[in-house]
Amino acid sequence: MLYGKLLRFTYRLERNPVFASVKRGLLLLTPVLIVGAVALMLRNLPIPGFQEWITAAAGGAVYSTLGFIYDATIGIMSLCLLCGISYSYAATISGSDKTFCLVAVMASLGSFFILFSAQSSGVFEFASLGAVSMFGAILCSVAATALFGAFSRYLPARLRSYSAGMDVQFRVSVSLIVPLCLCLLVFALAGLAMEQFLGVGSINELLSGGMMALFQNVPNELGKGVLFVVLTDLLWLFGIHGGNVMEPVAQAYFATLDQNGSAIVCKSFVDNFALIGGSGATLCLLLALLLFSRSHENRRLAWCSLPFGVFNMNEPLVFGFPVILNPILFLPFLLVPVISLLIGYAATACGFMPVVTTTVTWTTPAPLSGYAATHSVNGALVQAVIVAAGTAVYAPFVRLSEHMQQERIRIDLEDLLRVFAEESELPALGNQFLERSDNVGAVAKVVVEQLSRDLRAGSIPVFYQPQVDEFGGVCGVEALLRWRFRGKPLPPPLVIKLAREAGIYGDLTDCILDTAVADSARFRNALGRPLMVSVNISPYEANDEAFVRKAVRLVEEAGLQNSFCLEVTEEAALERFGKIAENLHDLFGHGILAAIDDFSMGQTSLKYLQGSNFQFVKLDGALVRQLLDSPRSQDIVRAIVGLGQDLNFQVVAEYVESRELRDLLLSLNCRIFQGYLYSPAVPPAELVRFVLDRDSARQRPVAGS
């Protein structure tokens, strides 16, 4: 019951346009954070020899360059976050109108600079562009974009600016001048009100002042320590850099205690025992992912984050998992640091671990930092206990989070299948799934990633559907893609479409071809006779000389001449491809037959049949399904079969699912059938058993029966 409610809440939350835009903006920060984290790690790597070298290398140029890289990435992460959220949210408001989205980003930027400038002097500090202003960036991007969108939609036409210029983009841009001005005016008034009535010059000052007020009424150091870590981590969960906001509190209540041997909870104690790995004690989350995660994506993220997490840089994990705005991880992210602080406090109070009196470089990894802070091995042992306990707390939430991820993917996959079905009915829609920024696009990318991994591993399953002649014997099989995504079979046309969009369709075709050739050789050995195996290819492969050469090489190496066929699908008019006729002739010369798929309803030119380029013609499934109810369709099939007799090609009927339909096709002189009347597509081993059973039971029908 609770799980279902949590799932429904999470599902609704993630489909909220504001929440989805904020989350998308946070995810877009990943490359910025990775690059900045590498630069930061190299600048602060706690190895004395390395630090001496990097500060002196090239006259300090290397050290300075790393600083520039940090300033250009993490140093402006609030600015990057603001642009990403604003553009994403504007796209949901305007339907991806790029001009509107770009001007909305400008409105958000202007609003951000207004709220984070010192109103009395108008001076903006560069430090406000970093992690310290993430909450303000989220607030300004959402509020300014929504306000700008409202002004754009509801502002009376007489108050808008219009231009008589010929350029459409220019006229649209001019029409947004008044909404932009009004949006900036609202934020300017809000900034002035904040200074006049609250006495602060920016949102950061307002947050820090509020935090200072909370601690004035907490009576003891343990209570202050617990409140400090809870608030720090709570701010992070909402995208606010808790460490920066809470820095005035740390300096006022904890930093001065570092040299006081009677105080247990000090800034160094909190950093090295309560927040191991960063806010949320995310080193424990990192280990929980590595030890207990069953998700390939999550384990890969953990391995990528490990070099940073060891040195207490958790941004790649916090933003990549993500932890921010993740309702599943709210509880452990707050609970683990409190448990860690209590364990460290108890170990110190009972005398097992000395009081922390030494400030340690923040990038020093555990357990070295525990030893350095306490000058005792027991400090390292306490850190080990804390990490083990924290990992144990995070573990069930990692598994719960993955269950939720799987359920969300299942729901999103249903949406993808629905959209694909709609596109099949209305081909003009022409959806590019990988270019979509919604949940359909997200799950399409996950599907493609899994497909790519399976291609690299050579684990693309190929099944075979028998083709049966008029006497009941199996005369051939068609190789069909039967790939599954997380146990669920996906329609082959969808898999092919996604493979095309991702640029891996050629790899998919090659994999199926390799598998079919290998299986064909096994069929011949198991059956004691050759069995015609057909593989679908597109006109693009049929037009590609390199593909043709590969097919010839594989077939000749396996000795499959005259028992291997390539079926050319009719997704485009074949006459557009100048090399197809020549390539088909070359294939035939090397013993590879050719078939045209879905004939009669596509775009095939009859000249390809006239030139004897195809040895088989497969009737379109839609035509076959109409036969029992449409005399006109029967006449079309009779004409195609007659044409085959004159031009020396055989006709194969697909989607034969009843004896009545089979008998009707026989009366029209069609002699080869494929469909569920005989068998669905089956794995290779099952196909061999099917053919052997058919061969042993094969009997010619009695005349007149």
Image (tube, helix red, strand yellow):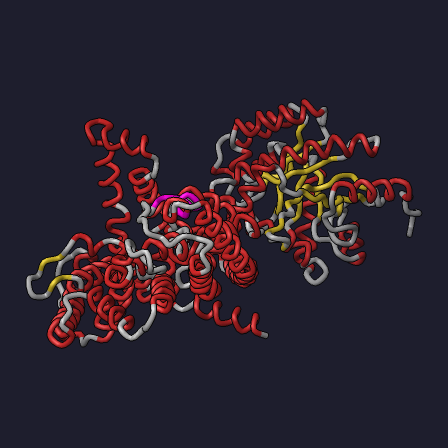
Name the spot of residue 439 as percent of width and height, x first. Answer: 46, 60
In terms of depth relative to the viewer, which is nearer, 388 or 185?
388
Residue ID at (29%, 34%) = 51
Q: Read off the magenta span.
A: 363-370
In terms of depth relative to the viewer, which is nearer, 697 or 32?
32
In terms of depth relative to the viewer, which is nearer, 447 or 353?
353
Q: Main secondary structure of the magenta part?
A: loop
Horizontal placement of 471 versus 598: left or right? Answer: right
Horizontal placement of 552 versus 122: left or right? Answer: right
Decide if residue 135 is in sight here: yes
Is residue 367 rendered magenta in the image?
A: yes
Residue 71, compared with residue 343, is above or below; it is above
Residue 383, compared with residue 524, is above or below; it is below
Residue ID at (73%, 31%) = 563
Residue that lies at the very extreme toward the left in this rendered image: 121
Name the spot of residue 167 as percent of width and height, x first. Answer: 18, 55
Q: Which quadrant of the rendered structure holds the N terminus?
A: bottom right
Name the spot of residue 646 as percent of width and height, x first. Answer: 69, 37
Is residue 563 rendered magenta in the image?
A: no
Decide if residue 173 is in sight here: no
Horizontal placement of 620 versus 110: left or right? Answer: right
Residue ID at (8%, 61%) = 122
In terms of depth relative to the viewer, which is nearer, 530 or 523?
523
